[in-house]
Image (cartoon, helix red, strand yellow):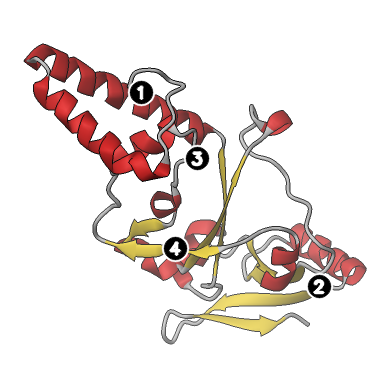
Amino acid sequence: MNDSNYWVKPHLIVQEREAAIQLLALSKENELRSGIINKLIEHEKLLKRQMQTLCVCSLSEAYDEPLMWSHYSDGMRGVCLMFDKDELKRSSLEFEKVEYGNTPPKIDFFDRYIKHKNNEEMELGKFLLTKHTGWTYEKEFRSVSFKVNDNIDQLGFLKKLKKNSLKAIIMGSKISQVDKTLLITLSEKFGFELYIAKANTEDYSVDIKEFK
């Protein structure tokens, strides 16, 4: 079982699991402890290698959420980019909705072990698409990609989008005049719409209006 080239056929997975349990049960205490530690270390290294090749693109439905404007746009000094999800899909960017809960996903050690023996890619979806309920207001969507070849040593990589992917930009009410002038110029050149976001002092909400 320690042969890294050993391959487990699908119909033998249950037998492999039972054999592993029996082997551990029959081992001496020190061998048992050592074997478990070694497998945990091996598994941790495997996860770290996979995580190092991982890139996540995060978007949100909450374009008018006050906390989003506070946290991610420097208190109304930044912008919100609005994309066409169908155009993003045509650019090979598939997004999945983040789930929110109070309990983090669990790891099935033997399932991971079997997939490793079969040289299968380990499924990280639940871990990458789960956040604590405290972040529910973000209404987040994520697209997960893995770096390959020339991108492997970079922190991330650029993704070329279809021409009409960007539909509009919402400017925060405190955006600098320099940035506002630049966005007006780009809007006229590329044809995307411009909006302005302002804090509503009556109910703490954010009002979004067309920029004129």
Q: Report if residue 109 is visible in the image.
A: no
- Residue 122 % position (x, y): 45, 41
Q: Which residue is mark 3?
A: 121
Kindly report the distance in space between the C-alpha atoms of the residues bearing marks 3 and 1.
15 Å
Q: Earlier in the sequence, mark 4 or mark 3?
A: 4
- Residue 211 % position (x, y): 74, 80
Image quarter of residue 208 = bottom right
Q: Earlier in the sequence, mark 2 or mark 1?
A: 1
Residue at the far left: name it.
29
Q: Which residue is mark 1?
A: 42
User: Amino acid type of disc 2?
Assistant: Phe
Left or right of 109? Residue 168 is right
Q: Which residue is mark 4?
A: 98
Q: Are marks 2 and 4 in contact (CB under 8 Å)?
A: no
Kindly report the distance in space between the C-alpha atoms of the residues bearing marks 1 and 4.
29 Å
Q: Residue at x 48, y 36 (%)?
A: 51
Q: Earlier in the sequence, mark 2 or mark 3?
A: 3
The foreground one among 23 and 138 is 23
Q: Which residue is mark 2?
A: 192
User: Amino acid type of disc 4?
Assistant: Val
Q: Nearer the viewer, mark 2 or mark 1?
A: 1
Number of numbered labels in the structure image? 4
